[in-house]
Image (cartoon, grey):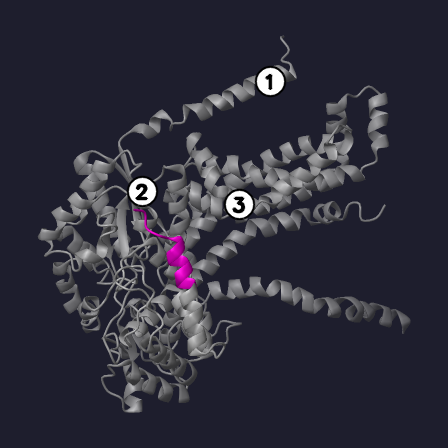
Amino acid sequence: MSQVSRRQFLRTTAAGAAGAVALGRAPAHAQARELTFLSVASFVPDTDKELKRQFEEWGAKNKVKVRLDIIAHLQLQTKKAAEVQARSGHDLTALGPGLGDADLYFDYLADLNDVATDVAPKNGGWLNPDDYLIRGKWKLLPWWMPPFPMAVRTDLLEKLGEKNPDTWEDWLRIGKKGKAMGHPFGTAMGHSADANVTLLSILWSYGGTYIAKDGKTITLNSKETRAALDFVKRLYTEAMDPEVLAWDDASNNRCLNAGKCIGIHNPISAYESAKRDKVLVPGTQREISEVIDHIHTPRGPVARKATTGYWCVGVWNFSKNVDLAKDFLRYHFQPDNLGKWVEAGRGFNMPFLANLTKHAVYKSDKQYRFIPEVAKVSVPPSWPGPTTAASQQVLDLYIIPDMFAQHATGKMTADQAIAWAEKELQEIYAGRKRKP
Amino acid sequence: MSSGLGRIRPLFTLYMPLAPFVLFALFPLYFMVVTSFKTNAELYDVNAVPFWIKRGVTFGHYQLLSQDTLFWSWFVNSLLVSVAATIISVVIGILAAYPLARLRFPGGDSFGVAIFITYLVPPSLLFLPLTTVVNRLGLSDSLWSLVVTYPTFLVPFCTWLLLGYFRTVPKEIEECAMLDGCNRLQTLLRILLPVAVPGVICAALFAFTLSWNEFLYALVFVSPAELKTMTVGVYSELIRGDIYYWGGLMAGACIGSLPIVIAYVFFLDYYVSGLTAGAVK
């Protein structure tokens, strides 16, 4: 029996490992035509099932093996970063929340100008096409948004003798009265997507902005921002509980469904889960979903404006199946398919296409009646500036919620909070200059 | 009289002082179990006492896990990956720790410290470069990607732990074996390892626990639903947008904690003696 020396063993092992690395490709069984799609879990599971059905149907028609992978939305950033680093992974990917991913990953995303042009006319056109262009190009297709109406307890409003609240000042008044009887208003003011959405909505409704249309000039320091800061301070101290500083995206849902909050600024998810779980109004046998209503996002002294999570879909340019991926997008964005998908999501997932905002699902339940209206006044989080990696970073670092929270809790005066946020914004925009 | 006092003395000197610590340690587990059996309606009820079940027990969350998700596939995946990664890491750890503990060679001490420093590099820094390696090896979207990458943090840990343990074993017993004709490998296998069983079990338990709980690599390297490990699968399926399925999450956590509990119950004595080796000489 021949003996293998230690040196020979090491040499052979090293050569084998090097060979495997140098080979650098997937095993033969993985080389069949396969299209993969990474998406985020919808709060309505039927949405994912319908997407899967359409993906498989398209795959069967085109003789392509398909794989839809679903992850929680909080995991998406990590997954995308890894796929870009390795220049390998899924062909299609969800992008968001926000359009800024497309600027951040601009060099790794395939141009979708042709697909965007193809699908728009069949669906009545894009709602605001200029908002979705990144450096003048379609690097993503805006896919769906969950508009943010105001979810309100009708029985408590009745008790307070309040009717049809429509402005942020109305909500301050109602929240104040509600808090006195143990039912405060609730909106997140910590590091969560909801906090970004609601506090940006208030800033704009009071006439403030943080960036100009040119995407360079910081515009936060204004009397309008001061008015918004003072309003939020009153809202926090007079109408809310301090716990809102620690809220995540699920906390306001819990507050409403637990029968505590009189109103929250949120998509219809809280209502849908209350209905599904048959949650009762505390101390009664009445289902809480029966006393929840959804009304328009509030108006401020200057405007009625809101934002939301802009969920998009893109195709990695390192994918070997760019054309197949585009073909599936054309298939999914056909009016019929998109319509079925919106229906499966019970309107939570509103596409950015004019005809879909008039989908029958929004008339199927009175709870959904304001959703198309909210969508009309919803703008990207970078409004009025363009979407850039910097605007995404403003969201990701929660600059706006932190500014409001520091003033509301009395840690900073309005001027100090604005100065702090202005400095942060200047640094972000200086460090994230767009490529020429 | 004195024998009566003797009987109740441990109650005051041992059990009562220990009780708060035991309660503190067990509370999260208790809360997890209780929550997993509550109805969603009760979970939302602000008037309900959170520490016990008022409106009846439900098995709905466990049903949800078993029927609407691939939970048991994820459980098996976690088990396969953890066992394989643990075996590989402990074997490599033994082979690395032995020379560091017993042989004198230039840079030996620095090498030991270097291994420990490797353990301190967080996976959140390593996952990006490792993604490239996993892809180049053609292992992405397979359980092998985890079996191969988990030892990157398990081997330094096992080596460091075993290094300390091996040093507590008297060198003289190995020297006797060598005088009787054993070579290095035989000494390791026949003399040192049987004596070092508590240390090896301790390392294996830690390695298994770390693998079982691992999240980041499992998220990044494996995408297909049926190949996910339990940590990633439960999180992906039961956190949907701003809706958290708390009952299901707690049910998943309860089942997920069982293998660890069982392992520690069986090997507790070894574990304690492995950890405390060298404390008294």
Q: Does the residue at mark 1 contact the one at mark 3 (Cβ under 8 Å)?
A: no
Q: Seen from this angle, which residue lies furthest right?
A: B2
Residue A115 drawn at (x, y percent): 17, 45
The dominant secondary structure in magenta is helix
Q: Does the residue at mark 2 contact the one at mark 1 (Cβ under 8 Å)?
A: no
Label at residue B123: 3
Residue linked to disc 2: A107
Report how far apart the C-alphas of labels 1 and 3 lie in the structure.
31 Å
Identity of the amino acid at label 1?
Phe
Q: Is residue A364 above or below residue B100?
A: below
- Mark 1 and mark 3 on one chain: no
Q: In front: mark 3 or mark 2?
A: 2
* CA neighbours of label 1 inside 10 A, class few (<14), some (14 to 19), many (20+): few
Q: Is residue A404 or residue A222 the one in the foreground?
A: A222
Q: In front: mark 1 or mark 3?
A: 3
Q: Is residue B73 or residue A436 the one in the foreground?
A: A436
Residue linked to disc 1: A9
